[in-house]
Image (tube, rainbow, N blue to C red):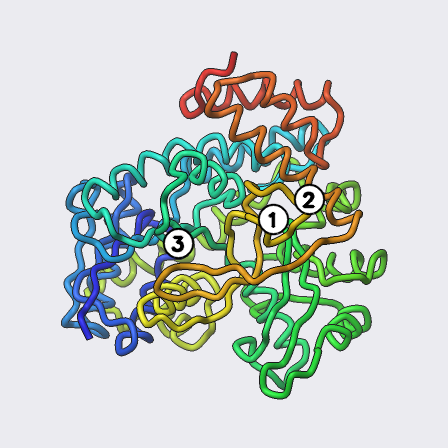
Amino acid sequence: MEKLRVCIAGGGSTYTPGILVGMIKKKKSFPLKKLVLYDIDAERLEKMGKYALLLMKEYYPELEVIYTADKETAFKDMDFVFCQIRTGGFKMRELDEKIPLRNGAIGQETCGAGGFAYGMRSIGDMIRLVEEIRIHSPRAWIINYTNPAAIVALALDMAFPNEKRILNICDQPISLMMAYARLLGNIKYQDMIPHYFGLNHFGWFTKIINKNNNEDLTEKIKQKILEEGFYPADKESRDPSWLVTYETVRHMLELDPTYLPNTYLQYYLLPRRTLSHLNPEYTRANEVMDGREKRVFSECERVISSGTIRVSALVEKEMNKEDAHGEMILEIAEAILHDQGRHYVMMVKNRGVIPNLPEEAIVEVVCELGKEGPKPLPVGKIGTYHKGLIEQQYAYEKLTCDAYFEGSYLKALQALTLNRTIIDMELAKKILDELIIANKDYWPVLK
C-alpha cells in the first residue's frame, strides 16, 4: 500500500495528541510517509511539534515529521489535510462567551451570539486556507473540524460550490454514541447503526440499531437516560460543564421523548434553564484554558525537557481510550482510502435528502463514505415541529454567511434576531454592536 502525506492545519491544538495516537494505532491500515503540523501560533506549534517528533521517534520511527508555519511547506503534495483551526484563539472565545452573558443571553462557543462571532472569524481564514491548499495540493482531501461547523460548512459551499473533496464533520454524534454504549454496557459504539437528521449541533437520533442482531436500542437508551441520567463515555476525565451538558439530555427527553436530542439543543430548547448554569465571570473558555490547555502543554514541556516520550502519562492515557475527535477523523480518511462504505453522521448539501427543507441547506445526516466521498442516505420528510426549528436555525446560519460575504450589518442583526438564544431585536443589536468592537481585527466591516 502506498504511504500517505498528511498535514494537520491547526497542529498546535490540544486535540493534536489524540490524532497522533490515532495515527500510531492505524499505521497498518492508514500508513503514513510524511506528517506536517501547521500552525500560525509559533509557541504552540513548537511545543506540539517537538512533542510529535519525540512521540513518533518512539512509536513510528519510519515517519517523517515536520512542523512549520510556512504554507507551501505545509500543504505541498498532501493526500489529506485535517483542519482544526481556531481564529482568535481562546482569548476571543472568552469574549464570544462573556459578551452575550453580560447581556443576559446564552454565551457559548458554537451556539447563539458566540457561535455567530466565531463563525464570522472562521469563514475568512477557512476560505484562505482552502485556497492555499488547492494551490499546492489540488487533489487533497480536506477534512474539516473547524467550528462553528454549520456556518463554516455553509460558507465553504458558497465559496467553493464545485468542490468535491471538502468534508465537514463533527465528533459530537460519535461522542453521543459512545455514551449510549457505556450506558447500555453490552455493546460497542462501532456496532451501532445511527439514524440521524438535523443541522450541525442541532439534530436528533431517531433510531439506534444494533447491527449484530438488528435490535432497535432506542427505547432502551431513552429509558436508561430517564432512570439513571446521562454522562459522557469518558465522564471521569471531563470538565464539570460537560457533565451538566450531558445531564440536560434527560430533561429534554422528559419534556419531549420523540427523539434522542443532541446535547447542544439545550441552548436552543432550554435557554433559561441553561443560562442559569452559566457563570458570566468564568465560562467554558476559562475552564479549558485552566484545565486541558495547561495539562496538555505542561505534558509537552515535560516530554521535551526530558527528551523522551516515555515520561508522558498523556500518551498512555490516549493509547488506552477511544478518542472521538482523533479516531473519527482518521476513520473517515481510512474509509475514503479503502472505499469502505462506512456509515457516519456528516454534513452535506441537502439536495432532497430531507425533501421539505431547502435544497441548498447543509444538513447533518447519515452518509455512506467511500472513495468518492459521502453519499447521504435519504431521511424523508420531517414533521412540522422539527421542520420549523431547523428552518429557523438554517435561516440564522444563511444570514450569518450573507452578512460576512456582503458586509451587511442588517443581515447580521437579522441573523442574531432569529437565533433562538436571543429572539429580541433590541438585545440582538446591543450584543452585535459589542461583538463588532471586540472583533474589529477579524471581521469584515459591516455597513
Disc 3 target residue: 14
| Left or right, 333 with reference to 277 | left
| Percent position of residue 400, x then y | 56, 30
The residue that appears at 47% across and 40% down in the rendered structure is 152
Vertical placement of residue 249 versus 218, above or below: above
| Percent position of residue 58, x then y | 20, 73
The residue that appears at 36% across and 34% down in the rendered structure is 125
Most foreground residue, 425 or 319 = 425
The residue that appears at 56% across and 64% down in the rendered structure is 175
| Left or right, 235 with reference to 28 | right
Q: Disc 3 and disc 2: Cα gap in Å?
A: 32 Å
Disc 1 target residue: 199
Disc 2 target residue: 390
Nearer-N-terminus badge (3/1): 3
Vertical placement of residue 64 versus 139, above or below: below
Q: Quadrant of residue 88?
A: top left
Q: Amino acid at mark 2?
A: Ile
Q: Disc 1 and disc 2: Cα gap in Å?
A: 7 Å
Q: Quadrant of residue 208?
A: bottom right
| Percent position of residue 444, x then y | 44, 20
Q: Disc 3 and disc 1: Cα gap in Å?
A: 26 Å
Mark 3 and mark 1 residues within 8 Å of each other at the beta carbon: no
For the N terminus, which image quadrant? bottom left
For mark 2, give the secondary structure: helix
Q: Amino acid at mark 3?
A: Thr
Mark 1 and mark 2 residues within 8 Å of each other at the beta carbon: yes
How packed mark 3 is, by other alpha carbons closer than 10 Å (few <14, some 14-19, many 20 or more), is: some
Q: Nearer the viewer, mark 3 or mark 1?
A: 1
